[in-house]
Amino acid sequence: MADLNRRHFLRAASASILGCSAAASPWLTTVTLAQAAPSMGDHRLIVVILRGAMDGLDALRPMGDPDFMLRRPTLAESGGPGLPLDGFFALHPSLAGLAPLWGAEELGFVHATSTPYRNKRSHFDGQDILEAGTGLDVPQPEVRDGWLNRMLHVVPGMQAETAYAIGREAMPLLAGAAPVRSWVPDQRLKLSPQARSLLEQVYHDDPLFHEAAMEAMDLADDLRLEDVARARAALEAADPDAPMEDPMMARPSGLPGRKLADIDALASFAAGRLQGETRIAAFSLSGWDTHRRQAGALGESLSGLERMILKLRTDLGPVWDKTVMLCMTEFGRTAAENGSQGTDHGTGGAMIMAGGALRGGRVLGDWPGLSETALYDRRDLMPTSDVRAWAAWIMRSMYGLDRTVLEGAVFPGLEMGPDPRLLR
């Protein structure tokens, strides 16, 4: 039994050193999970931060607005006309694979929404405010926790499962007093034959460390082979006809097949935990800043998000019916395209929601229009709702949190407004 326990310890230690192939991708940043409290019931919540300011006007195109084509003569139909949803809005062509979810009312949107952040349009400040969930439009240095962590803190009996960070970015969304741990697997135990030989000689006469060191290196080799096998399987699933190469020797992850493999690995990892006792998962996806040549860059990011949602739906199985996924970004982008066929930092944007527990098939929020007088600062989509309110109503519906707690402790200064009845 002692040998078995030691082997288990060494495997865990080696795994933490080795990491995971997904960490090499700049597209995947942070994943954190939290175990359920008994009072939380059986719902699952997934929060995705889309870092870089997703262009909601392109992701969900207001084709029924007469000013849309005037402000975006190039982008309005880039990649094709999109998928009509309700006679007014059309889904970006790169999200057309989500049509079955829309038909099943497992996909929904909020348009013209934003945090309270205004005017300065800094990614760093915008993300800080989004994840802190404060009611002011400037970052508050004294606020050191995020709204999702505060939600965990007010749920009676909440326990933390080991949290997993895939990539190098922290998530202020989950920082705070509630117990959430992090794992950043961005280092590997890669020893050359010469280095291994040297370690064997160093530990040769040490009865305490020699056997343990050799076993750790053997386990590292085993884990590397397991990692290769998983990466091969993911790559083959992404493109069965693609020529196979050793994933450890592959080029950087700008290749579409590599990105697909990383997305699949992240979704499968999260789904596996959510099928068990885990109830909360949060992670971030980067790459949404589209100042130039937006058609290609945004299309690729949206395709990745589409795949992420569909993979989670598949891997969660029946748990999908108990799940809501919120995809949020720090702010929107300008109403008009710029001279380099991109868009600049704006204000009002869009939130994407998915899940079997969602009352979807709707585009929520009040549409303000895109005429010059309707724009914020005569350049941006005017926000007509607070993005925090939608998250608060999800948490109230899923976990029964008191409205005064949500408007005070979780989202200070928030006025939630009427119940939009987001869950089935």
Image (tube, rainbow, N blue to C red):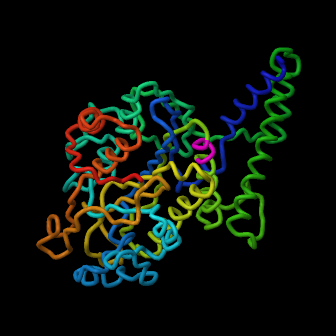
Q: Quadrant of residue 195?
A: top right
Above or below: residue 46 compared with residue 209: below
Q: What is the quadrant of the N terminus in the image? A: top right
- List x then y, in percent, for residue 199: 81, 29
- List x then y, in percent, for residue 337: 30, 76
- List x then y, in percent, for residue 252: 63, 60
Most foreground residue, 324 or 122: 324
Tag count in the figure? 0
Left or right of residue 360, residue 186 in this image: right
Q: Quadrant of residue 231?
A: bottom right
Above or below: residue 57 compared with residue 193: below
Left or right of residue 87, residue 33 in this image: right
Above or below: residue 411 compared with residue 87: above
Residue at (50, 43) in percent of width and height: 281
Most foreground residue, 241 or 417: 417
Residue range corresponding to the magenta coloring: 271-275
- List x then y, in percent, for residue 290: 39, 67
Residue at (50, 27) in percent of width and height: 159
Residue closest to the far top: 207
Left or right of residue 232, residue 172 in this image: left
Left or right of residue 1, residue 264 in this image: left
Does the magenta portion include 218?
no
Residue closest to the far front: 424
Does the magenta portion include 272?
yes
Q: Quadrant of residue 75?
A: bottom left
Q: Main secondary structure of the magenta part?
A: helix
Above or below: residue 248 compared with residue 39: below
Most foreground residue, 104 or 68: 104
Residue at (74, 69) in percent of width and height: 240
